[in-house]
Image (cartoon, grey):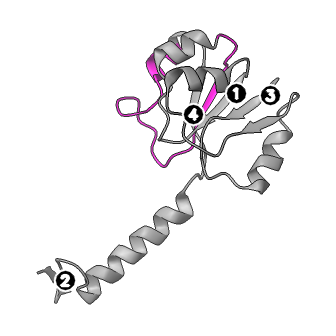
């Protein structure tokens, strides 16, 4: 599904390879911001007339933002979790207004695995407050 324009609203960590792939879906190009917008009006200005917006967990896409960006058709959440109750995007309002909200597939999976392995090493070696010994946690 091609979009007129895709905007990466904040520092999502998406690399150049991902941007090149996104360009295949953006008739009017991809605009990428590398900072976190400080105000809701700044978010609205960035999203503007885009049909697709990608955001990290740092930026809240509220009902008001969605209302003021009527051309928006898709919001991609570049974070490890997608949960309506705790999301930084008003998923309920978006759904009621035919705006698709999805978690970006495979986003952060490698980093999550690295974190889990590092924590297991800390646990086994006793680095930090706990150490695993003979089948029990001390």
Between circles 3 and 2, the one closer to the viewer is 2
| 106 or 8: nearer the viewer | 8
Count of numbered labels shown in the rendering: 4
Q: CA distance from mark 4 to mark 3?
A: 14 Å
Q: Which residue is mark 1?
A: 52
Residue 55 horizontal/vertical position (percent): 58, 37
Comes first in the chain, label 1 or label 2? 1
Comes first in the chain, label 3 or label 2? 3
Task: Answer whether labels 1 and 2 touch (C-beta < 8 Å).
Answer: no
Residue sitting at x 59%, y 44%: 35
Q: Secondary structure at mark 4?
A: strand
Q: Is residue 67 magenta?
A: no
Comes first in the chain, label 4 or label 3? 3
Between circles 1 and 3, the one closer to the viewer is 1
Tell me, for residue 131, which label it has, or none.
2
| 31 or 95: nearer the viewer | 31
Vertical position of residue 58 compared to residue 129: above or below: above
Q: CA distance from mark 4 to mark 1?
A: 11 Å
């Amino acid at each position: 599904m091609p979009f007129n324009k895709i905007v990466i609203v904040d520092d999502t960590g998406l690399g150049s390879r991902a941007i090149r792939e996104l360009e295949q879906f953006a008739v009017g190009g991809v605009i990428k911001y590398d900072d976190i917008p400080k105000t809701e009006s700044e978010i609205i200005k960035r999203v503007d007339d885009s049909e697709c917006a990608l955001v990290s967990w740092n930026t809240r896409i509220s009902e008001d933002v969605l209302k003021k960006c009527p051309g928006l058709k898709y919001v991609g959440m570049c974070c490890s979790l997608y949960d309506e109750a705790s999301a930084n995007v008003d998923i309920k309002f978006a759904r009621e207004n035919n705006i698709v909200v999805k978690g970006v597939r495979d986003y952060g999976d490698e980093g999550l695995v690295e974190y889990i392995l590092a924590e297991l090493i800390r646990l086994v070696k006793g680095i930090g407050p706990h150490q695993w010994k003979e089948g029990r946690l001390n």
